[in-house]
Amino acid sequence: MSSSRQGSSLHPRDGKRCLEDKEAPLSIENAVEHNENHRTYHGFNKGKYMLPNDEEEQDRLDFLHHALLHVTGRLTYVPHPTDGRVLDLGCGTGIWAIDFAKKFPDAFVLGVDLSSIQPAEHPVNCNFYAPFDYEFPWQLGEESWDMIRLQMGSGSVANWPSLYRRVIAHLRPGAWFEQIDIDLEPKCENRTLEGSALYSWYHRLKRATNDAARPISLQFGTVVDQLLNAGFTDIEHEQFQLPLNRWHPDTGLQHIGHWYGRAFFDAIEPLSLAPFYRILEWPLDEIQRLVTDAKSEMLDPSIHSFQMLHIYKARKKPKQ
């Protein structure tokens, strides 16, 4: 596992410094992790991000990466130079950054995350800086990035307008931002979910994360307006249906249901543990009962349940 040191050069091709020594308050080496309910969580800014960071969670994140590739067939969604500088916010295990670096060997990719869970071995044109909290001011070089991306940020951001302003300040004129997120609210084509375990699970999770000031329920209808207010242009919004099992008659969506259904099945428990335990003060056995019931319902092909994947693309205005 490797992380770039404060003040280190993070662009080996041109020697530009992305980080400055004065950034020390934003990132602390060797932050102590902590255990809770048999899972391990990040220690830097303890409790801010409520998903685990242990090996089990890392495997889940990697599988989700592959599942989303099966959904969209694309590694990225916005134009970018093949030799550009790319910033991956909340990079997790670094799997996307590594895949991008391999596909575009002339590009440079920097992944930042609260947890230092990225591999020590990675392409020479890829680097990681962790722990790093992207909700604090960055010293990553304003107007120096050709693409910035954020995937699965809901539940970890308290102030989206502030984050969007920070993103646009760090993009070069004419460069692009992409945001990929999933609306975790289960929906159903053939019945109401009200009164179901899935319904109960989601609405309790929504309440807990709202109380923690990091809502899992991103207001997807307001994202475009927030991007416009931050100064972005050429904004596009794509949506994909994500069946939770293989119920769909369309073979393509059956395939997606197979991949995404497994990814969501593995996500229900880690999504629930910290919010229910810390915020709602549920005992572990009660959490596990609801998780088990929700998993059982999502696997039931007679329940045509699904979620929605949202992809936002936004450009910083080119210089006139």
Image (spheres, rainbow, N blue to C red):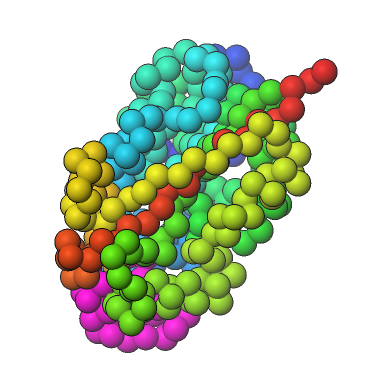
Q: Position of residue 242 (x, y in %)?
A: 33, 50
- Quadrant housing residue 177: top right
Marks counted in the figure total 0
Query: Which of the pair 59/214 is nearer the observer?
Result: 214
Residue at figure coordinates x 45%, y 30% from the top left? 76
Q: Position of residue 188 (x, y in %)?
A: 33, 64
Q: Is 17 placed above or below 112 here?
A: above
Q: Quadrant of the N terminus?
A: top left
Q: Position of residue 282 (x, y in %)?
A: 37, 85
Query: Which of the pair 212/108 is nearer the observer?
Result: 212
Residue at figure coordinates x 32%, y 36% from the top left? 69
Residue at figure coordinates x 51%, y 52% from the top left? 153
Residue 136 horizontal side relative to residue 219, left or right: right
Residue 14 horizontal side relative to residue 74, left or right: right
Residue most extreme to the right? 320
Q: Is residue 119 visible?
A: no
Residue at figure coordinates x 56%, y 55% from the top left? 220
Residue 318 horizontal side relative to residue 245, left or right: right
Q: Is 118 placed above or below 316 here?
A: below
Q: Quadrant of the C terminus?
A: top right
State whether the magenta stretch is mostly helix, strand or loop. Answer: helix
Q: Is 114 placed above or below 176 here?
A: below
* Region of the chain picked out in magenta, as a range: 270-295
Q: Is 177 one of the magenta-colored residues? A: no
Q: Is residue 228 visible?
A: yes
Query: Which of the pair 289/74 is nearer the observer?
Result: 74
Q: Position of residue 92 (x, y in %)?
A: 41, 46
